[in-house]
Image (cartoon, helix red, strand yellow):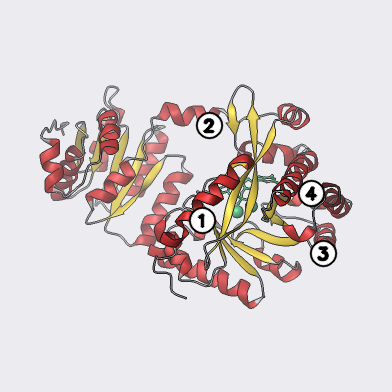
Amino acid sequence: MIFSRDVGVATKAKNLNIEYNKQARTIMVEKSTIKILVLDDEPFILKLLAHMLTSLGFNQVATCDSGRGALERIDHPNSPPDLILMDLNMPEMDGIEFVRHLVERRYTGSLILISGEDERMLQTAEKLVRAHKIPALGHLRKPVNPEDLFALLEKWTPPCQRGSLAAKNAYGADEVRAAIVNGELVNYYQPKVDLVSGKVVGAESLVRWRHPQDGMVFPDQFIGVAEEHGLIDDLTRAVIEQAFAQVKTWQDGGLYLHIAVNISMDNLATLEFADYVAAAAFTAGITPDSIVLEVTESRLMKDLSAPLEILTRLRLKRFCLSIDDFGTGHSSLSQLRDIPFDELKVDQGFVHGAAGNDTLRTICCASLSLAQQMGMKTVAEGVEDQADWDFLRSTSCDLAQGYFIAKPMPAGEIPDWIIAWEVNIENLMKSPGVR
Ligand code: C2E
Ligand code: MG
Ligand code: MG
C-alpha cells in the first residue's frame, strides 16, 4: 500500500479522453494535495481507479484491498485520507460495515461509493453514509467513467470549510428576534418558468438574514428557531410586507408576476391570520390572485381545525394555495384530500436526477398525474441541470423552478434577469421536450 506518485498527467488524461479546460486544471492543481484512499477487493479495479485519479491530477493516491487494511491506514496518525473511494461489496468486511467503523473513528474525510450493485442499492447506501454525517460526494456504478469521477471529485471540500458552516448553525431566539426587529431579513426571489412557453410567470420569495457579522444566513438556520420560540408570526409578517410591496413596485413598472410566499404551519394556528394576509394585500394595493401561499407540513399537526379554516378562508379570498415539498413531511395525501390547494410543488428530492433514475421518475410522474387529476397546477422544484429541464418538458408539468433556470436573487436583479432569460428562451426551447 503506497501512495503512487504518477507524472505525465496530460498524456494520461488524453488517453482517457478527458478534455481539460483551464478552469478545471486550476481546481485540480489545488486538489493535488488531497490524500485519497481507494478500497476495493478487486486488484484490477484498484489499478484502474488509481490510474484514473493520477491522470486527473491527484498524486497522493493509496490503494487497499480490504476493509481491515484500510482501517489500519486510517488509524495511522500521519496518513488519514481526506477522501475514500469505496466498493460496497467486499468479501471480508462489506462497505456498510466499513462505514460503521469510520463512524466509530470519527472519520472527518469524505466518501465516494463505487459498486456494481444496482442504482437503488447505491442510493440507499449513500443515504446511510449521509445519515452517519459523513460527507458522501456521490456514487458511481462500475465500470467507472472518468468524467463522472471527475464531477464527483470537484465537489470535495476540506473539513475545516464544512465545519465553519456548521458552526454558524446555532442562532438563539434573541438573535432571531433582534434580526426581525432590526429589519435584517430580506427576501430573495427565485423565478418560476412556464415549461411550454419558457416565459417567466412568477417567483418564489425566499427569506435571507443579512447578518451584520456572519454575512448571508439561510432560512434553514433560523426558521426552525423562529417556529420553536413563537417568532414565526413576526417573521412571516416581515416577509409578507416586503413581498407584497415588491409585487406592487413591479406591477407599477409593468411587470406582472405571481409571487409565492412560504407559510409555516405555525402561522395557521391563529385564526386572525387570514384577515391579516387580506389586509396586507389591500394595504399594499395588490389583489390576492397575484399571491401564492406555499404551505409545508414539516411536522405533525395535532389539531387541523384552525389550519383548515384559515386556508379555506384564504382560498375564498382568492389567494392561490400551494402544497410545497409534496411527497415529504407528514400526510401529504391527506392534506390533498382535506385542503383545496390550487398548486402542487413536487419536492426537489423527486425532480433532480429523475431523468436517469427509475424510482424518482415514477414518483415525480405519479405526483404530477395526481395533481392534474385533481385539477391543480404543477411546479417542479430543484431543476438543476439540462437533463432535469429536458425531462420535465417531456412531462405534463406546468412550471419549473431551480438552479438551472436561476438561483434566488435580490429583487433588484429580477427585471434584468428576465430580459436576459427571454433572449435565451429560443435556444432552450429547442431541447427535445415533446408532450
Ligand atoms: P422551499 O420553499 O422548498 O424553497 C426551495 C429551496 O430550495 C430554497 O432554499 C431554494 O434556494 C432551494 N433551491 C432552489 N432551486 C434549487 C435547486 O435547483 N437545487 C437545490 N438543491 N435547491 C434549490 P432556501 O432559500 O434555503 O429555503 C429553504 C426552505 O426554507 C424553503 O424551502 C422554505 O421551506 C423555507 N423558507 C424560505 N423562506 C421562508 C419564509 O419566508 N418563511 C418560511 N416559513 N419558510 C421559509
Ligand atoms: Mg416554498
Ligand atoms: Mg419546496
The reply to whether the C-beta atoms of the residues labelled 4 and 2 are less than 8 Å apart is: no
Q: Earlier in the sequence, mark 3 or mark 4?
A: 4
Number of the front mark, 1 or 4:
1
Q: On residue 422, which mark appears?
A: 1
Q: Residue at x 17, y 31 (%)?
A: 3
Number of the front mark, 3 or 1:
1
Mark 2, other Cα within 10 Å: few <14 / some 14–19 / many ≥20 = few
Q: Is residue 271 left or right of residue 44?
A: right
Q: On residue 166, which mark appears?
A: 2
Mark 4, other Cα within 10 Å: few <14 / some 14–19 / many ≥20 = many
Mark 2 vs mark 3, CA separation in Å: 39 Å
Q: Earlier in the sequence, mark 4 or mark 2?
A: 2
Query: Mark 2: which amino acid?
Result: Ala
Where's residue 183, x and y in %? 74, 31
- Which residue does the numbered mark 4 point to in the structure image? 267
Query: Mark 1: which amino acid?
Result: Glu
